[in-house]
Amino acid sequence: MFRMTIAAALLATAAPALAETHVVTPGDGAQERLQEALIIAQPGDEIVLEAGRYAMSDGLSLDVEGVTLRGAGMDGTVLDFTGQQGAGEGLLVTSDNVTLRDFALENPKGDGVKSKGADNIVYHRIRVTWTRGPHPENGAYGIYPVESTGILVDGVKVTGASDAGIYVGQSDRITVRNSIAEANVAGIEIENSRNALVAHNIATRNTGGILVFDLPSLPVMGGGNVIIENNLVVANDTPNFAPPGNIVAGVRRGTGIMVMANEKVLIENNILSGNPTAPVMVIAYVQPYDDARYNPLPREVVVGPNSYDGGGYDPQLDGAEMLLAAFGGELPPVLWDGLGSLAAVEGTAGWSLNLTEAGKGLGAAQPGPLSVKAPAAAFDRSGIGAPAALEARLGG
């Protein structure tokens, strides 16, 4: 029994006892030394990037579970990809239980940080910046976890992405919080994902602030169970600079929060100010598709109490002048196309296109004041958000 007890104790403490710290410094050869550290690291190891500017000539990759990559702060440790060869992401992670924290990436040719099939990943105080500002040749995504379960994005900042600053796709159990998305096409986008909490973020100077989409013909379908609450969604008025053909190229300048073809989405306690097309937009997917699994309608979307100020005053919509005249010079804050199902708390000001069929376009619209029922019950929050265990990695 004594021998078994000793063996169990050794097993329980083996990883921490054997974990190593790999320190990487800026300067000549930093690219090779950092990539080497990412390769030789063992589960439980920490790679420390000392303060300074690192000139990167190529993308980086990590495929070891349980590694922490830590810098000296999002303004202290900067991975500069201005001279990057090729068009890949700055950092690609393909392993589970990874923590990325306290460093920045500037000017990656492709995406900033992409994690694919990487469960239980933490992004903490990561900055991704395209320093020339909005430009169609910037990388598509700043923070880009996809096809994963368990994602915590906390305290990041992304500027200049030509698609979405913070994008989570085809994933489950997600929290995006305390982050800033500025001057991207989409500030924060949750796509084909379930059980996502988007809270206490700032989305400003994007084309669209926060988007919740579900699209056809992707491996993971059926986005839903999303809560968008306590965010500051302000002055999202940057003209759309997405490359042609990109799905977000269709986002209207001045959209605050947009829900398209998703189910069970709650929007409440947000501050929405200065979003000139629509502070809140709930619509169906209108492009042609060939996917029997797909439902193009928004369903069971709930608009709770929010604070609205100065939205809908310069809508990027067909017939804008006529609409503004009809509604007294400014459109009500909630725009619904009339398809699917929407509920809103009493007193919510809005308007509807009153469409009766998807794909008919604005020519079939019969605009009028919003008339929907109040929510029938409290929103079911069970299972929404990142697993609580990821919180423990934020200390230190």
Image (cartoon, rainbow, N blue to C red):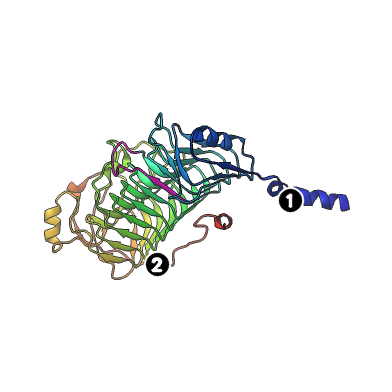
Which residue occupies the foreground of this view, 280 or 176? Answer: 176
Residue drawn where x is 67% and y is 45% of the image = 19
Residue drawn where x is 54% and y is 34% of the image = 35
Question: Quarter of the image containing the C terminus?
Answer: bottom right
Q: Can residue 272 be found in the magenta stretch?
A: no
Could you classify mark 2 by the number of other residues whose Cα lies within 10 Å: few (under 14), some (14-19), or many (20 or more)? few
Is the stretch drawn in magenta largely helix, strand or loop? loop
**At label 2, which amino acid type do we have?**
Ala
Question: Mark 1 or mark 2: which comes first in sequence?
Answer: 1
Q: Position of residue 279 (x, y in %)?
A: 27, 58
Which residue occupies the foreground of this view, 124 or 293? Answer: 124
- What residue would you read off at disc 2? 376
Q: Position of residue 97 (x, y in %)?
A: 58, 46
What is the magenta range?
124-138
Q: Is residue 201 left or right of residue 392?
A: left
- What residue would you read off at disc 1? 12
Between marks 1 and 2, how big is the CA–CA gap?
49 Å
Residues at circles 1 and 2 in contact by the CB criterion of under 8 Å: no
Q: Kindly identify which numbered label has been placed on residue 27.
A: none
